[in-house]
Image (cartoon, helix red, strand yellow):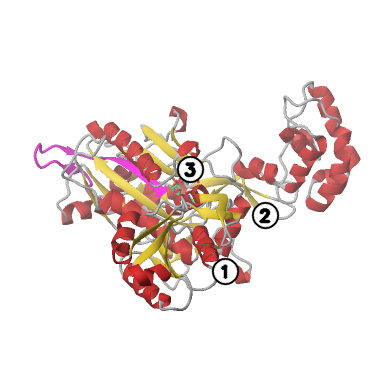
Amino acid sequence: MDMEKLVSLCKRRGFLFQSSEIYGGLNGFWDYGPLGVELKRNIKEAWWRDMVAAHDELTVAAGAPGTYEMTGLDCTIIMHPQVWKCSGHYDLFCDMMQTCRQCKKLVRSDHVREMLRESDWVQALLAEVRCGLDATAPAWEAEALLPWVKKTCRKKAPGFAAVRDPEAAVEQLRVAQLSGGSPLTLWEALARLATPEPAAGLQLPCPHCGGDLTEPREFNLMFESHAGALKSEENRVFLRPETAQGIFVNFKNVLDSTRVRIPFGIAQIGKSFRNEITPRNFTFRSREFEQMEIEFFCHPDTSRKWYEYWRDRRMKWYVDLGLAGDRLRLRDHAADELSHYSTGTADIEYAFPFLDAGEYGELEGIAHRGDFDLRSHMEGKLDPTTCPLQVEAGADGKPKYRGSGRDLAYRDEVTNERFIPHVIEPSAGADRAALAFLCEAYREDQAPDDKGDMQTRVVMRFHPRIAPVKVAVFPLVKKDGMPEVARDLYRALKAKVTAFYDEKGAVGRRYRRQDEAGTPYCITIDGQTLADRTVTLRNRDTLEQTRIRLDDAVEEIAARVQ
Ligand code: ATP
């Protein structure tokens, strides 16, 4: 699927707009349009309903080690700064970043290669030398790069070191190639051309202008603000980078105010903010986004079983809503990828069309977090730079950050056992889910137009539960009493589901517009309706048209879109 076509459909049909577009937009921020807001709301509602509201705490769910309860929370975006110190975000929530000395733009260090590969001047290089420029590629002539440096780079990458003295740079590359024995990789070649004095260490160039990048340095991703009139250190606050911490700090409140008992989960949906260095790939990496998170508290002895349950349960949720096939996968982290406190983490990933073949992007992470979070908020943290490991109960040494001092342990009423619960965290992004559902839904196929000729149509095949509009109602023509009947039906439908009314233009054109919006059903009121009170029900995916009774239409649609 062509990502550009989807991006343009999203704008044209009102799924997604760039934030503040009339002022040139703001990088990393997106607005949901009239169709997009319905799609995202449906995803969040499906998640809440399936995970929380409709959860049956009396019956053992398939694959679960026992029954469990679910409840919800809605916490503030700004919390006490100590929350972020004890959670580790204040010291450790960083990405490595480099600045271009020429164009001054910032780049995330682990994105440099991907961005270079995507940049049109490097693409032009790959086309020029017609080989992969990797270790397995046939030998290539350094001189063949001269026209590329002189033409493409001068225009598109003016900061590239080789632009200043192309002959000398290419000669240096030739010498390196001869002395190296094996062909240079793309990255070696670029680094040689980008570094005037290679003896000081090779460095990849800036993907934007080809200029030289500074050494990588840490950059904390939390947005800062000040609570109160004074912009002082004491008033410094942070916009939450995840919703999870609000749940941990309210753990005791939930226990004390409800009758939930372990095992149980607390769910929250809400905005999170990360000052991503290089927001990219449409909404995939945004600076403001929404998360749907569960913290599931259980006994340490059964925590592994609960982790496995949640990992499989969450994967099934995406499959049930239509993300099937080889584009979706569940990937268990290897031991060396795990955080020091985690005994298991898995990602649910989707092969987004903007990624290279074989690459996947994270939709959701499911982590076994042990007692790390509750313990941190109880006891505080040692200096994470000198002692990254969590303070053990009874360990010596004063924590750098004091915890709340509250007892966040749990006492089992039956056994009287006291323990700090273990936590399983399924953490999903509503925007990444929406993007995956948009990518998965996009199809082009053939359908007959008003004259019966086959035409290419764009159709968004959303699962009916998440489709922004469930049904559209059309009078075939704007006369003979058809609009009146259609409007009455529309009003009746609207009381139950999201419905749309349209009486303008040829009916085939109206069907096409609903196909692009992903509306699963259209109902047309025609001459026959007035005679026998039946209507045409058209199915978006099969294009099948059947006649149903007008008086059954509301119940029929409500049942089909559940
Ligand atoms: P990534 O490695 O892609 O930056 P992450 O591992 O940091 O993601 P988590 O901290 O596990 O992400 O956050 C949980 C979920 O929140 C992610 O799976 C994703 O769906 C969503 N999310 C995280 N960062 C962003 C972002 N910048 N834009 C949109 N969604 C995000």
Mark toward the start of the polypeptide (2 vs 3): 2
Question: For residue 174, which quarter of the picture?
Answer: top right
Specify the amino acid type for callout 3.
Glu
**Percent from the top left, x then y, of residue 343?**
36, 32
Q: Nearer the viewer, mark 2 or mark 1?
A: 1
Secondary structure under tag 1 reads loop
Does 226 appear above or below 371?
below
Q: Nearer the viewer, residue 148 or 4?
A: 4
Gap between marks 2 and 1, in whole Å? 21 Å
Confirm whether residue 233 shows in the render. no
Magenta includes 314? Answer: no
Q: Are marks 2 and 1 in contact (CB under 8 Å)?
A: no
**Percent from the top left, x then y, of residue 420?**
23, 40
Q: Residue at x 39, y 72 (%)?
A: 486
Give the magenta part as a residue range: 406-428
Q: Is mark 1 within 8 Å of ligand 1?
A: no
**Percent from the top left, x then y, of residue 441?**
49, 50
Kindly identify which residue carries mark 1: 20
Specify the amino acid type for callout 2.
Lys
Badge 1: residue crowd in 10 Å (few <14, some 14–19, many ≥20): few
Secondary structure under tag 2 reads loop
Q: Is mark 2 within 8 Å of ligand 1?
A: no
Q: Residue at x 19, y 37 (%)?
A: 66
Question: For residue 410, which quarter of the picture?
Answer: top left
Question: For residue 481, which quarter of the picture?
Answer: bottom left
- Side (left or right) of 524 relative to 209: left
Q: Which mark is residue 90?
A: none
Specify the amino acid type for callout 1.
Ser
Q: Which mark is residue 105?
A: 2
Gap between marks 2 and 3, in whole Å? 26 Å
Q: Which mark is residue 362?
A: 3
